[in-house]
Amino acid sequence: MNRSSIRHKGRWAQTWIYLWKFLRMFIYQNDWKVLPMGAVIAAVVTFVVGTNLFVTQEGTLTGAFALVCVCIWNGFFNSIQVICRDRGIIKREHRAGLHISSYIAAQMIYQLLLCAAQTVVTLFICNVSQVRFPTEGIVTPWGIADVAITLLLITYASDMMALMVSCIVRSTTTAMTVMPFLLIFQLVFSGSFFALSGFAQKLTALTISRWGLDSLCAVGRYNEQPMVTLWNTLFKFKDVEVMGQKPILEIVQRAYGTEYMDEFLLWSGKYNQNEAYLSTLSNVLHNWGVLLIMMLVFAAAAVIALEFVDRDKR
């Protein structure tokens, strides 16, 4: 992109000029490789956890967490280097009349398209892995549509966070050094797999993973599913003898393979419900809204940070 082509262009025109530039780079500079890479990651994850995803509470929680990790990884990898690797070019074109807001807007549109494509790929892999999506949605009439929107929001929010980081740092080396720490922070403070309390628990409100996991479990109807941990524990101790008898074995034998077993699993699930995973319209929209706010904050921070690109002394 030469300077004369953008010197007298307005913000809207510049946005479309750079968007077409990014789309050409997607094709001719092999940026499309993020799609098969995301497919491989999704395939590995769904191969391990796909059977019980949206079937049992344990399977839904583990599978949802794994999908959140996939989305965050995809989003981070999409844009963690895109600004810092072209920082010199952006600096020259900014001095020639480039509006930073137009450049970031073009990146936002392009990254949204890329995240949407990754979401489609992830859903396709889940379908091939025979993941049983909820039949009814909370926000839309279809459960798979709610899951798709949630995955897209998680991926795009992660993408915008990485874009912000790419605007702040000045080299790709620094960007790739920061990314693992961001990923670890997202995973540790997701609020589900690690016991957190006090200030650490409050930090979960700042993570994409917390709101993404809450959203996936809500649209996946976690609270309506059976819990198998208690049954598995009983089955594990079925041969324990009490005064020469095996009372647990007798209970397991009577219930196994009957409607009593199904009732027991549903009953135990009722005592393991989580208020954060309520399958209500207000809860899902609240979680989605937080992710949207995060996107806007990250995008605004990216614009502000990149406005100072002229001060680079490199």
Image (cartoon, helix red, strand yellow):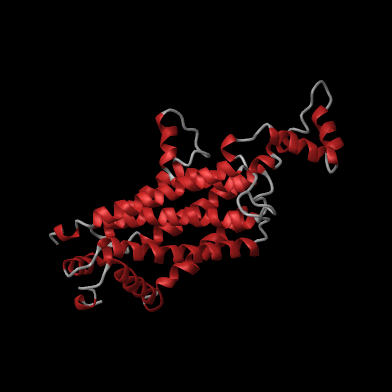
From the viewer's perspective, is 94 left or right of 128? left
Residue at image position (48%, 47%) is: 289
- Point out the image quarter for the C terminus: bottom left
- Please state which of residues 118 and 249 is positioned toward the viewer in this rendering: 118
Could you say where residue 107 lies in the image, as x and y percent from the top left?
Answer: 35, 64
Could you say where residue 76 lies in the image, as x and y percent from the top left?
Answer: 40, 57
Quarter of the image for residue 243 reads: top right
Residue at image position (32%, 61%) is: 104
Could you say where residue 108 lies in the image, as x and y percent from the top left?
Answer: 38, 62
Is residue 177 in sight in this rendering?
A: no
From the viewer's perspective, is 226 left or right of 89? right
- Point out the image quarter for the N terminus: bottom left
Quarter of the image for residue 283 reads: top right
- Please state which of residues 163 and 194 is positioned toward the viewer in this rendering: 163
Residue at image position (54%, 43%) is: 214
- Please state which of residues 238 and 294 is positioned toward the viewer in this rendering: 294
Q: Residue furthest top?
A: 243
Residue at image position (69%, 36%) is: 269
From the viewer's perspective, is 129 left or right of 106? right
Asked if 155 appears above or below 257 in the picture, the reply is below
Q: Residue furthest left?
A: 313
